[in-house]
Amino acid sequence: MPDQDRISARAASTGASASAAHDGTSTLFVGDNNLVLRATRFGDQDAPVVLLLHGGGQTRHAWADTGRALAAAGYCAIALDARGHGNSDWCPQGDYSARALISDLRAILESLPCTPYIVGASMGGLTAMLTLGEHPELACRGLVLVDVAPRLERDGVRRIIEFMRRHRDGFDSLEQVRDAVAAYNPARKAPQDAQGLRKNLREDSSGRLHWHWDPAFLDHAVIPEGDEGMFGQARLNRAARRLSLPVLLIRGYHSDVLSDQGARELMALMPQAHYLVLEQAGHMVAGDRNSIFTSAVQRFLYDLESNNAAPLSSPSKQGVTL
């Protein structure tokens, strides 16, 4: 069945409407130590759940287009703000460690009424990998890892952290924010209207704009050095070996965070995994090539639900480029 026909069939079978596909509903979860974690749900709450986990320094709004598309395709997409990010609670103790993130995800998975799929970008993907690998009692129907693996490139991680630290005192205007983003990711076309960036910002009492995450998060965001890091390469390798669920790894061709070698090393640890490379995309894969990225995720989900032995029909450990 052609992809568009499968999208229409899935949407019709779950009663998804145009309104449900585009109007997100605010919801919340309770994480470790009773931290309130905010989320947006797209689509019918009785449809198959796809949990969307963003990267460090991002918010759930990074998944808005993907969430709407998944809802239109008949899924219930839940985009979560991680602790200390977006509208979720800041941790009073400043605990943004891997342990805390894993505990939050465990609490969410245990609270869901059904077994979800998980799509995790960067920090979200590493959190999911450790959580599922170290807690096999937690069920997940399939995992999409977005530009992340146990071995990351130090220079790429350093560039992200330096960008986050560079603007700790905030911005005077949305135009300054737009210029900062354009300087970090010059390959992506800067938006003409900077108002769209406001959802990723918070305003202090003096009117200055800041990224919408707790600055204490940076105390845990460190550049990998051997096995040192926020998650630990050896620990991630052990977790990856334990994963038996279907996995799709999507890497941005121009990513300076995950290399092709790092991706292939992960593939060697997971015989059931498949590897896809998106051209004209960097580390921010979903933002750089959202339409193609979301279509790839949808095909992966459809193939799993139809028990297709070869998700996406062709991607393999060698990597297929789109």
Image: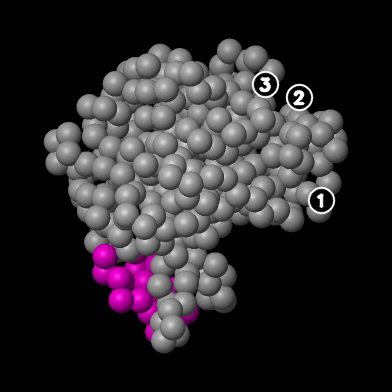
Residue density around tag 1, few if under 14, some if 14–19, many if 20 or more, within 10 Å: few
Does dot 1 land on a helix, a strand or a loop? helix
Q: Which mark is residue 18?
A: 1
Of pointers 2 and 3, the one earlier in the residue sequence: 2
Q: CA distance from mark 1 to mark 2?
A: 22 Å
Q: Amino acid at mark 1?
A: Ala
Q: Quadrant of residue 26?
A: bottom right
Residue at 60% x, 30% y: name it.
116
The image position of residue 132, as x and y in percent, is 44, 25
Q: Is residue 315 left or right of residue 187?
A: right
Q: Dot 2: what SS?
A: loop
Determine whether, in the image, residue 163 is placed left or right of residue 85: left
The residue stretch that appears in magenta: 165-186
Residue 143 forms part of the magenta stretch: no
Give the class, few, some or many, for how many residues have Cα within 10 Å of label 3's Cα (few <14, many ≥20).
few
Query: Mark 2 is on which residue type?
Result: Met
Question: Could you say where residue 94 lies in the image, as x and y percent from the top left?
Answer: 32, 55
Q: Which residue is mark 2?
A: 1
Of the residues shown, which amino acid type is indicated by label 3?
A: Glu
Q: Which tag, 1 or 2, sits closer to the chain's start?
A: 2
Q: Which residue is mark 3?
A: 305
Relative depth, front residue between 118 and 306: 118
Mark 3 or mark 1: which comes first in sequence? 1
Report the Cα–Cα distance between label 2 and label 3.
Answer: 13 Å
Is the residue 40 above or below the residue 44 in the image? below
| Left or right, residue 21 beside residue 266 | right
Q: Up-down: is 49 above or below 274?
A: below
